[in-house]
Amino acid sequence: MHDFFDKCIMKKRSIFFAKFFMNTFTKYIAVVVSSGVLLATMGFVAAQTDTTIRPKPIRTDVLSRIKLIKDTRRQERAQKIILQMDNINQRLVNHYDTVLDKLEAMLKKVEGRAQKVADEGKDITEVTQAVQEARDKIALARRAVVDQDKKSYDVNVLSVTSQAATSDGQNKLVSDFRKQFQTLRDQMRKDLFVIRDGVMKDARMAVQNAISSLSQASAQKNDQE
């Protein structure tokens, strides 16, 4: 009866683990979708900004170049897009941090459960190794997230014309900013997705492996009998 109860607990935990990551992935998609207007736009369309995050101020050289745009609405949109670059990066960085916090919390539960399994006289060597590997993967992901948090996606003013007195000059100015925004958007998206599909995925799989190892260690008694 005790073994049956043990198996039920591990099965429920496996189901919980699957649901947790499905919910996490859903929340991640929601974050991307809410920020997606900027990630999908080709230029002068502003995404909604998370007011709980204080963006970095726009560099004075970039701001002075923006003010060469005669259309005040385009000026405002350009400033918003630059601020939103940092805003979206911060939102995804914060999201990654939250996911890693939850993975660490789950790993602590695995360790607590593993100790109980060890107290029952079962071998938890593989569990211990899996937990350590998961900790290493989480630490690696933490470093990548910290590095991402330090990144700035700034307009290269040398690539934006300053000759904006004529109608053609204005068109060139707006076009240059659009190209810069697209380049920065693509680079930011690439950087964020590299983390998501790389170290974040590795950390998640490592924690999942630790849980699987715990399940196998807990079932040892049946094998022995």
Image (cartoon, rainbow, N blue to C red):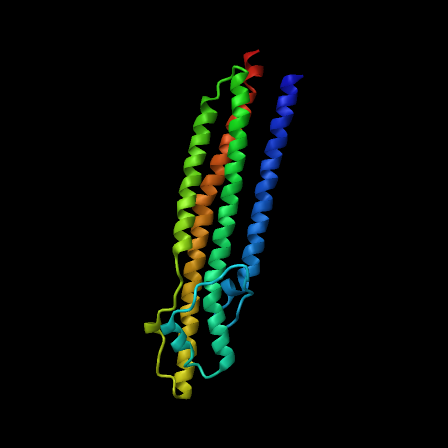
Q: State the count of labels.
A: 0
Q: Is 146 above or below relative to 5?
A: below
Which quadrant would the C terminus be assigned to in this image? top right
Q: Residue reaching furthest top? A: 225
At x 51%, y 67%, the residue is: 41
At x 51%, y 33%, the residue is: 107
Q: Position of residue 51 (x, y in %)?
A: 55, 62
Q: Is residue 12 visible?
A: yes
Q: Position of residue 174 (x, y in %)?
A: 43, 78
Q: Residue reaching furthest bottom? A: 166
Which quadrant would the N terminus be assigned to in this image? top right
At x 53%, y 69%, the residue is: 46
Q: Residue reaching furthest left? A: 158
Q: Is residue 217 visible?
A: no
Q: Position of residue 21 (x, y in %)?
A: 57, 42
The answer to whether 5 appears left or right of 101 in the picture is right
Q: Position of residue 184 (x, y in %)?
A: 41, 64
At x 42%, y 83%, the residue is: 170
Q: Quadrant of residue 153?
A: bottom left
The answer to whether 78 appears left or right of 16 in the picture is left
Q: Quadrant of residue 180?
A: bottom left
Q: Is 190 above or below relative to 11?
A: below
